[in-house]
Amino acid sequence: MVDAPPERFEAAIGAIDAANAEDPDELVVGEVRGPKELVHARMMTDWVQRLDPDADELQLLAARAHHFRRWTSPRSDQPPGRSGYLRWRTAARRRHAEEVGALLAEHGYDAAEVARVQRIVRKQGLGADPAVQVHEDALCLVFLQTQLADVAGRLGDDATIDVLVRTIRKMGPAGIAAAADLDLDPAGAALLTRALGVAGSDEDLAR
């Protein structure tokens, strides 16, 4: 953990939560219901702690702020299609990092600490930085819990399998193991099992 007063961390988490609580959209996951990005951020933080019990406060701040006020820049800001989605996602990630950086500076975090949180939010170093990999794994797990059913309903099984295979390829072993143990609905579980099989076959062929 960063050697700093716990009050600073708690105040920053509270400020991030207060901002995300303004999300007009609602997310329901099991018995949990609330502003979408607030629920999403808390799930993300929980997964980071489960995947890395030694996660420091900068990792947890990045988890809490990974979609900071995302509803203010909707997907419709970019053209339809995958290229438009990727541009939107990159711009959103950059904006989240900038806005949470300003918030953290206001709560007493120094430039190096702010930069570390921003690198994790932007997922810089994925594949080389263990903290960024944990962050990515947590993101993928929350995606599976909150969006898989909707994606499957919109895209159909075959296209959803493609999405899931791309997701699995970004995950580390711990994240993949956690994904396999998720309590999904039968249709989602079947799709994930198929995708895990495809991804595993692809890895075998690459060896």
Image (cartoon, helix red, strand yellow):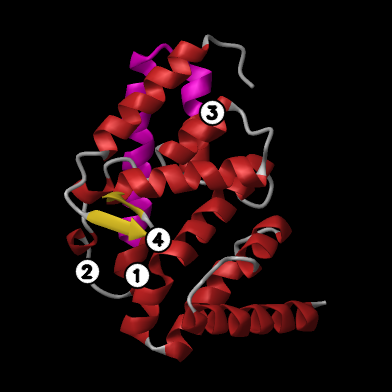
Measure the alpha-carbon separation of dots 1 and 4: 33 Å
Q: Is residue 125 shown to the viewer in this render?
A: no
Q: Which mark is nearer the camera, 2 or 3?
A: 3
Which segment is the magenta one?
87-116
**Residue 100: within the magenta?**
yes
- Left or right, residue 12 beside residue 111: left
Instruction: Name the residue that disc number 4 marks.
Output: 30
Task: Assess whether mark 1 and mark 2 are in contact (beta carbons under 8 angstroms).
Answer: yes
For numbered disc 2, what is the local secondary structure? loop
63 lies above or below 170: above
Relative placement, left or right, of 20 versus 105 is: left
Mark 3: which amino acid?
Answer: Leu
Q: Which residue is mark 3?
A: 58
Residue 83 circle label: 1
Quarter of the image with the C terminus is bottom right
Which of disc 4 and disc 2 is earlier in sequence? 4
Residue receiving disc 2:
79
Q: Position of residue 18 (x, y in %)?
A: 27, 31
Q: Nearer the viewer, residue 58 or 89?
A: 58
In three-dimensional space, the C-alpha distance between marks 2 and 4, rounded to whole angstroms, equals 33 Å
The amino acid marked with disc number 2 is Pro
Residue 201 placement (x, y as % from top left): 73, 84
